[in-house]
Amino acid sequence: MASHGLPVAGASAVRLGFWFNHDHDGWSGATITLRSRDSVVVMAVLATVVGLTANRSWAICRFFLHRFARPMESDTTIKARLGKQEQVILRNSETAGSALLGILRLVWAQRKMSEHIHRIPWKPIVLSAVMLAHFAAFIAAGVLTSQVFSARRTVISKNTATCGQWQHIAVENDSPDLPSLLANAYEVQFTKSEEAHNYVRNCYSQGSSRGILDCGKLATRSIPFTVKHDADCPFQAGACLNGPNSAVVFDSGNISLQDLGINFRQAKELFVRRKSTCAPMSDEPFLGRVYTNQDQGYEHLGSQATVREYEFYNSSEPGDGGKYIFQPERSSYGYDLHSFYTPTSPKYAWKPPFFSHTNDSDTSLTLLRGSGVQFMHPSDDPVFAAHEVAEVSKSSGGIPPDYTAYKMDHFLNIIACHETAQFCSSITGQCSPWAGLNTKRRMQNILGELLLEGKPKEGTEAIYATSLVTFLLGHTSIPYSIAGRPAGSV
């Protein structure tokens, strides 16, 4: 993908060296992050150290076992001879494993000899137990050495100088750099949206991954959510198309910062919650003018063709209103989709005033047009409602005479969403107020006192950690999720 001169964090985006992984308790979270070439060197050094330690420790252990196997004066001839043979095996064995095999062969060879003070030769048992313990300990050490390094690609985030999001560079409207900067910003936004879309299609399905993407690179493979139908309309009276109880709520519930891959001490006890309440709206209140070939600038239209102009808000500044123009289609192979945030500045006025400027939520509008799409059966879906009979040309042949197609009931389907978020803490049992995703109020400024009361150090860490989330909450909105993928996101 072309970069268009966008700088990247590169290797500096990964923190190298020692750090604590707070997903684990105590010292088990001590972690070191190395480059691949350095990890190979350290792995080789550790393997060498384990091998040398095994050899030298066996030499010391062998010395004490040799003295332990020494025959006593009270031993019988057979027992004394057995002890000497054990000493010979210990003296000539370079590893605990070879010594263990030698002792076992000796015990097996002497099993039929009857001159024993005790029925069970306890010295060979003790020798075998010590040898087995030494052998098993260093086998385990060798296996654990290979497990010291993890090649997992799981992303764990922490507030660092290189952690953040792409920001648009503010330039004047007449700047010659404006077109290229806008192209760069669009490319970044579209690419992130497309990557997220592919991840959801491949990794949110039940069962294993389809194998196209790595579904294990994130701390949590998928984020659960609940859907509630027949919810209260979140807008002013008369705004929702199908009545006051026609909204649908998408609620993530409390998601811990640990599940999002953010690593700090209280990540398991701090939560973020996202909620979108959406409802279809009628397009008639927003319809401004209908143009025909009798209007200036539209002389090219056919005698029966029209163009519809919708106006969603106007501004105190000329030419800064929210107008969209659509031309009806007799047939088409797909949908047309636009999505945008409702402006929050007081200089904008809604037409009609269905929405208000508040800090507890943001409002997004999605405009779905599919007047030329034909349905084989009627549809009662609130968004894709289709009951009107469509005109079908049957002159080309192959179409049954009794074939009936349907088209969408509304020329423009409008879906309005009330989008909001909040933070909660299981430490204090408190939650922050609901706030809009793009509100200018810095939500994280109140989190240190609200969520980690009386713990100033932890409160500072909480502010840093939650800032990673608050900066990206706007990217979870519906307009940002569509981001340059109009028809492909339907």
Image (spheres, helix red, strand yellow):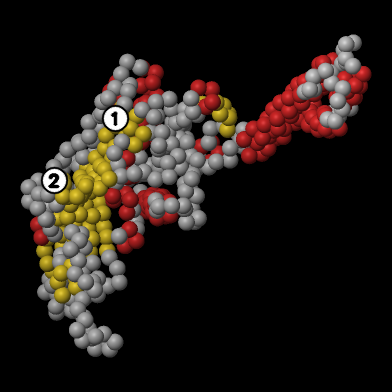
Structural crowding at the residue carrying mark 2, measured as other residues with C-alpha within 10 Å and reported as few (<14), some (14–19) or many (≥20)? some
Three-letter amino acid code at disc 1?
Answer: Cys
Look at the picture and state if 281 lies above or below 21.
below
Instruction: Give whichever of 429, 348 is nearer the camera.
Output: 429
Please provide percent x and percent y for residue 398. 29, 87
Tell me residue 124's x, y (percent).
Answer: 80, 23
Expressed as whole percent of the image width and height from the top left, the position of residue 370 reads 23, 67
Location of residue 123 by image quarter: top right
Q: Which residue is mark 2?
A: 232
Work out whether residue 105 can be spotted: yes
Mark 1 lies on residue: 424
Q: Is residue 124 found left or right of 439 in the rendered image?
A: right
The Cα atoms of the two marked residues, 2 and 1, are separated by 24 Å
Identify the residue at horizontal 16%, vertical 62% (top origin): 309
Q: Quadrant of residue 263?
A: top left
- 454 shown above or below 370: above
Could you say whether the residue bearing mark 2 is in a helix, strand or loop? loop
Residue drawn at (31%, 27%) of the image: 425
Residue 318 is situated, as x and y percent measured from the top left of the image, at 16, 51
Residue lying at 14% horizontally and 71% vertically, measured from the top left: 388
Q: Which mark is residue 82?
A: none
What's the amino acid at mark 2? Asp
- The residue nearer to you, when weighing 176 against 444, is 444
How many numbered circles does the render carry? 2
Along the line of sight, the residue nearer the viewer: 226 or 61: 61
| Quarter containing the C terminus | bottom left
